[in-house]
Image (cartoon, rainbow, N blue to C red):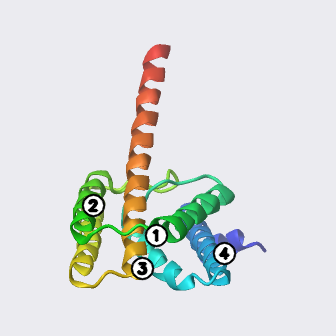
Amino acid sequence: MNMHNYLHNTLGFSNYEIAQMRYFTSSILSELSKILIIGGFFLTIDMFYLFIPAAVTLCCLRICTGGLHFKHYLSCLAVSFSVFFIDINILNKFLFIKPVQLLLLCLCIIINYLCAPVVSVFRPIPNGIRVKRSKRQSTAIISFYLFLVFILPTSSYLNVGFWMIILQSIELLAAKIFIRRNKSNETTCHSCSD
């Protein structure tokens, strides 16, 4: 007996509930494997200590804001790896003075508030309550980080988090533009065929 039949016949789960469990399980395994692969890379080049704050910052934001979503695991892994590599190995070398960092984080708060959430096409469109909660959570996370940047001395740990917030905000903005462009093209195509 396969797992689907067992869940359906023995435990009484509906096909929809089983599909939700399958999506949840595959999402968790996919994200976990990407973190292990990317983390393993930074471990081998002795930069794991910077991967941790970057990953924590990204996970906190990404959970509530969403962003770009890919249909294939390898494309998602490649983009995720690129974001971490750019953050840790390239952008982390650039350090802005605190007033500039604070100003950019305020800009990120605005971008995240206006654009969040951007969910996968495989997930239901969030209702008004979830949208508001997502906006509040992203605002709180970036505001907390802004506070940390304000009170703590500059460090590479804070800097990778700062750049990850910048990169995630750019990604979120790109995802929102992509979605709007696709909706506009669909509307144009439908009106042309009428």
Which badge, 1 or 2, is on the more N-terminal residue?
1
Which badge, 2 or 4, is on the more N-terminal residue?
4
| Secondary structure beneath label 3 | helix
Q: Residues within 10 Å of mark 3 (few under 14, many from 20)?
A: some
What amino acid type is highlighted by mark number 4? Answer: Ile
Left/right of residue 107 with respect to residue 27 in the rendered view: left
C-alpha span from label 3 to label 2: 17 Å
Mark seen at residue 104: 2
Which badge, 3 or 2, is on the more N-terminal residue?
2
Q: Which residue is mark 3?
A: 156
Which badge, 4 or 3, is on the more N-terminal residue?
4
Residue 127 spot, x, y in % from top left? 31, 55
What amino acid type is highlighted by mark number 1? Answer: Lys
Is residue 194 visible from the viewing direction of this image? no
Left/right of residue 134 with respect to residue 180 in the rendered view: left
What amino acid type is highlighted by mark number 3? Answer: Ser
| Secondary structure beneath label 2 | helix
Mark toward the viewer: 3 or 2: 3
Left/right of residue 183 with respect to residue 4 in the rendered view: left
Quarter of the image that includes the N terminus:
bottom right
